[in-house]
Amino acid sequence: MKAIILAGGKGTRGKPYTEYFPKAMTPINDKPLIDYIVKYLNSFDFIKEIIIISDYTGLGGQIKNYYNNPKNGKKITFVQDTQSGTGGDLLHIEDKLKGDSEFVLWFVDNLCAIDLVKMRKVFKEKNSTACIATRTKRKEETGFAVVENGIIKEFKEKPTMKLQLSECLGIYILGKEVIKRIKAKIKQKEINLSFDVLQQLSKEGKISAYDIGEKEWIDAESPMVLERNEVTVKKIIKQMGF
């Protein structure tokens, strides 16, 4: 089984930082964000190869240079991002998935010590075409208040909220059927994985959800977000075993 890391994109939310380095290279304790993901994926025995999709003609070249350094000897394959959407770029790895019935897809701005063994089990038990990591609890970054008849009765500082809908995270296990669905839309200039492919699969009842439960997760969109959530980041890194 292979793991695909999507490390392309324009990093719009991370500007001005992403004008100088790709989001994947955002530093956390003197190591780039992507290195935590790579090492974590390598900790699972069933993952045999990691494929990183990025724009290596641009800032993504920093990722390739980092892993070409002998002291960071990881078994990694690099695939050029063609700016054809989150779905379109997966067509470039079709030939590399021969012999595999499913693969992990990890968006590089997702930091989470997700249990891929359990997630893979859900994927198989539900006979899914896709399985998406979700959560139903979220720790808020702002304060809340209990209000009765226009009077504040109690403050709740940054509470953990129960979500009415499951929040989708950027970590998937996908069957090769997804690639076939993407190929059917190849005439589109850009193919969005969620809206152009997974939306239809959800209507067919072919997508399962793996709730991460009490595990922490963060959208590592910029150095500012990571710094503001330093405690959470440290907890996730510890859960990952680092």
Image (spheres, grey):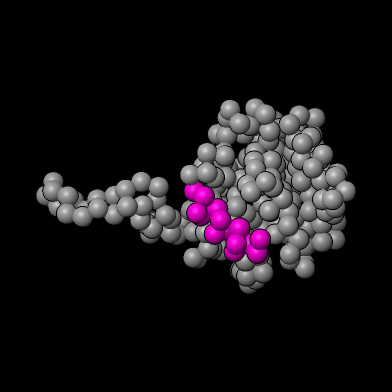
Point out residue 171 in the picture as x, y percentages from the top left corner. Answer: 62, 54
- Picture layout, residue 66 above or below residue 100: above
Point out residue 106 in the picture as x, y percentages from the top left corner. Answer: 67, 51
Residue occupying image coordinates x 78% and y 57%: 2
> 29 or 150: nearer the eye?
29
Is residue 149 shown left or right of residue 63?
left
Q: Is residue 133 visible?
A: no
Residue occupying image coordinates x 17% and y 50%: 152
Q: Which residue lies furthest to the front in this view?
A: 30
Marker count (numbered): 0
> 192 or 12: nearer the eye?
12
Is residue 200 shown left or right of residue 191?
left
Residue 220 included in the magenta stretch of the image:
no
Q: Can residue 157 be seen in this view?
A: yes
Residue 241 included in the magenta stretch of the image:
yes
Dominant secondary structure of the residues highlighted in magenta in the image: helix
Point out residue 86 in the picture as x, y percentages from the top left corner. Answer: 67, 41
Is residue 73 shown left or right of residue 185?
right
- The part of the image, by quadrant, that contains residue 61 is top right
Q: Residue furthest right?
A: 70
- Picture layout, residue 194 above or below residue 189: below
Residue occupying image coordinates x 13% and y 48%: 151
Point out residue 135 in the picture as x, y percentages from the top left corner. Answer: 49, 59
If the image is split into quadrants, where does the N terminus sit? Answer: bottom right
Which residues are drawn in magenta? 229-242
> 87 or 50: nearer the eye?
50
- Picture layout, residue 69 above or below residue 10: below
